C-alpha cells in the first residue's frame, strides 16, 4: 500500500497535488512519500516482532540521505555494498553498529573504514576476502565480526540478472565448501564469527525459495555448532518483490516471513533481513512530461522527457512500470503508445504498448520508481540527473536539486594544448 492516489482527477502524493511539484521543479523528477517508506519499514519490523531481529534496509535501492535519515530514525539498520554507502549512512545519522556490509568486491580501504566505524558484520563472499579481512583487522588491531554469505544453490525464480543464489552466480560461497571456510575462519585470530548470511535474489514473489535456502542454512548451522562454532545471527537477505502491475499480488512481509519463522521455531538466533525494493519501490514515482506524440505506420510513440539514464530498469531488465497520467481524462481518445525517451538507443523506453489518453505537454507518472530508480541513474547522453522531492503530509522537501550542466561537467578539464 502506498500514499499516491487521485483526488478530484489529480494525482496526489500524500496531501500534495502533484501539479504543484511539476510547476515548481519541472520534469523529470522523482517524488517519494515519507508515510509510504515508514509504513513499509514498519511492516517488516512488526513481522519479526516475536523475536530478536534487525531490519537492515538495503541502501542501494534508494540511497538519498533523507531516505536513510527517515529510516534510521525508525531504528533501521543498513545493508551496504560499498564504502560510499557507508559514508551515506553515517552522514544520515545512521548507527554503524547496525550496518552489515555485503558485496563480492570489498577493497582493503573499505574494510579498514568499516572496521574503524565498528560495523555490525561483514558478509564475507569469498575465501580471499576472508584472508584479506583477517589481515586488515590485524593491522587495525580489531576483530572483524563476520558472517559467511552462503550460496545455497536455489533458484529464486526471478529475472536472471537479479537471481543471486545459484551455483553459477558470482555471489557467496557455495554451501558445500562453506563448512570448511567457517572452520578456517574460526582459526583466524582477527576474525570473529557472528553469523551466517544468504541473499538469493530480488523481486521474489513467494517465500518458498527462501524457505528452501533457510533449511539448508540451518543444517549447516547445526553442523557448525556440533563442531564448536556458534552462530549468533541468521541474515536471510532481502528480495521480497513488489506489485509493479495493477492487480499483482505479493505476500505481505508478515506472510512472507511466516514460513521462515516456522522453520526457525524456538531457536534463539537473531534474524537480520535486508529489504530494499519492498521498502522504497512503491514509495516513489518518476514524473515526466510528454514532449511529442509521433504516430507511424506500425506504432504510436509518446516521446517523453525522461529516459533510460533517469530510470534504467526497463532497458536493463525489460522491467514493467505502470505509467499513469497525472491528470485523469484529458478528453483525448485513448490509443496504444510506446512511451520512449530522447536517448539514442532503441532500448530507451519507459513502457511499451500502453493504453493512454494523452496529449503533448501533459505529465505522466511512472510508478514503483522509488527503488533502483535514481540510484541507477547516469549522465548518459549528457543529461543532468533529475531532482528528488520528498512529500511528508502537506509538506514538500527538495531532497536533491536537479543537477546543473555546470555540475555535470565540473570534474572535466580541457587538455593544455593540442598541436
Ligand atoms: C540488493 C541486495 C538486497 C536488497 O534486495 P531487494 O530485492 O531490493 O530487497 C539485499 N541484500 C543484498 C546482499 C543485496 O545485494
Image (tube, rainbow, N blue to C red):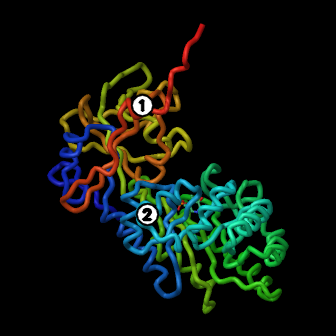
Q: Is residue 127 left or right of residue 231?
A: right
- Out of 41 and 113, give the one closest to the viewer: 113
Query: How far from the left and from the top, in percent, is residue 2?
Result: 33, 62
Q: Is residue 398 above or below residue 89?
A: above
**Residue position for label 1:** 383
- Out of 178 and 185, give the one closest to the viewer: 185
* Earlier sequence position, callout 1 versus callout 2: 2
Ligand 1 has an atom within 8 Å of the beta carbon of the residue at disc 2:
yes
Q: Is residue 177 above or below residue 306?
A: below
Q: Is residue 175 left or right of residue 121?
A: right
**Residue position for label 2:** 279
- Out of 63 and 274, give the one closest to the viewer: 63
Q: Is residue 378 left or right of residue 193?
A: left
Q: Is residue 138 left or right of residue 67?
A: right
* Quadrant of the rendering where the C terminus is positioned: top right
Which quadrant of the structure image shows residue 403?
Answer: top left
Give the secondary structure at mark 2: helix
Instruction: Report if residue 179 is visible in the image.
Output: yes
Q: Residue at x 51, y 66 (%)?
A: 78
Most distant residue in the left direction? 8
Which quadrant of the structure image shows residue 268?
Answer: bottom right
Q: Residue at x 61, y 73 (%)?
A: 235
Give the secondary structure at mark 1: loop
Amino acid at each position: 500500500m502506498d500514499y499516491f492516489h487521485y483526488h478530484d482527477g489529480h494525482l496526489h502524493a500524500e496531501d500534495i497535488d502533484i501539479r504543484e511539484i511539476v510547476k515548481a521543479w519541472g520534469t523529470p523528477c522523482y517524488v517519494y512519500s515519507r508515510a509510504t517508506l515508514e509504513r513499509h519499514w514498519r511492516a517488516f519490523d512488526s513481522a519479526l516482532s516475536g523475536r530478536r531481529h534487525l531490519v537492515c534496509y538495503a541502501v542501494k535501492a534508494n540511497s538519498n540521505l533523507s531516505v536513510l535519515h527517515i529510516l534510521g530514525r525508525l531504528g533501521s539498520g543498513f545493508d551496504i555494498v560499498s564504502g560510499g554507502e557507508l559514508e551515506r549512512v553515517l552522514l544520515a545519522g545512521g548507527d554503524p553498529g547496525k550496518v552489515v556490509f555485503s558485496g563480492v568486491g570489498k577493497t582493503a580501504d573499505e574494510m579498514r573504514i568499516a572496521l574503524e566505524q565498528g560495523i555490525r558484520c561483514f558478509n564475507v563472499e569469498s575465501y580471499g576476502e576472508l584472508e584479506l579481512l583477517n589481515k586488515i583487522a590485524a593491522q587495525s588491531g580489531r576483530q572483524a565480526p563476520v558472517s559467511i554469505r552462503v550460496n545455497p544453490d536455489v533458484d529464486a525464480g526471478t529475472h536472471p540478472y537479479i537471481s543471486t543464489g545459484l551455483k553459477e552466480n558470482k555471489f557467496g560461497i557455495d554451501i558445500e565448501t562453506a563448512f570448511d571456510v567457517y572452520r578456517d575462519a574460526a582459526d583466524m585470530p582477527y576474525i570473529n564469527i557472528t553469523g551466517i548470511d544468504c541473499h538469493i535474489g530480488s523481486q521474489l514473489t513467494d517465500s518458498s525459495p527462501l524457505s528452501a535456502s533457510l533449511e539448508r542454512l540451518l543444517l549447516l548451522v547445526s553442523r557448525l555448532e556440533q563442531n564448536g562454532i556458534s552462530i549468533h545471527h541468521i541474515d536471510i537477505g532481502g528480495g521480497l518483490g513488489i506489485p509493479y502491475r495493477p492487480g499483482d499480488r505479493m505476500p505481505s512481509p508478515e506472510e512472507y516471513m511466516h514460513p521462515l519463522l516456522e522453520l526457525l521455531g524456538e531457536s534463539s538466533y537473531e534474524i537480520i533481513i535486508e529489504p530494499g525494493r519492498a521498502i522504497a519501490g512503491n514509495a516513489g514515482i518518476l514524473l515526466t512530461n510528454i514532449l511529442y506524440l509521433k504516430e507511424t505506420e506500425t506504432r504510436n510513440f509518446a516521446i517523453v522527457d525522461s529516459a533510460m539514464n533517469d530510470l534504467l530498469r526497463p532497458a536493463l531488465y525489460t522491467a514493467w512500470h505502470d505509467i499513469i497520467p497525472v491528470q485523469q481524462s484529458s478528453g483525448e481518445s485513448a490509443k496504444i503508445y510506446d512511451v520512449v525517451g530522447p536517448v539514442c538507443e532503441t532500448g530507451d523506453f519507459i513502457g511499451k504498448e500502453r493504453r493512454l489518453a494523452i496529449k503533448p505537454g501533459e505529465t505522466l507518472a511512472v510508478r514503483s520508481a522509488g527503488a533502483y530508480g535514481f540510484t541507477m541513474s547516469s549522465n548518459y547522453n549528457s543529461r543532468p540527473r533529475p531532482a528528488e522531492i520528498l512529500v511528508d503530509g502537506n509538506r514538500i522537501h527538495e531532497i536533491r536539486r536537479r543537477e546543473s550542466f555546470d555540475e555535470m561537467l565540473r570534474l572535466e578539464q580541457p587538455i593544455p594544448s593540442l598541436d
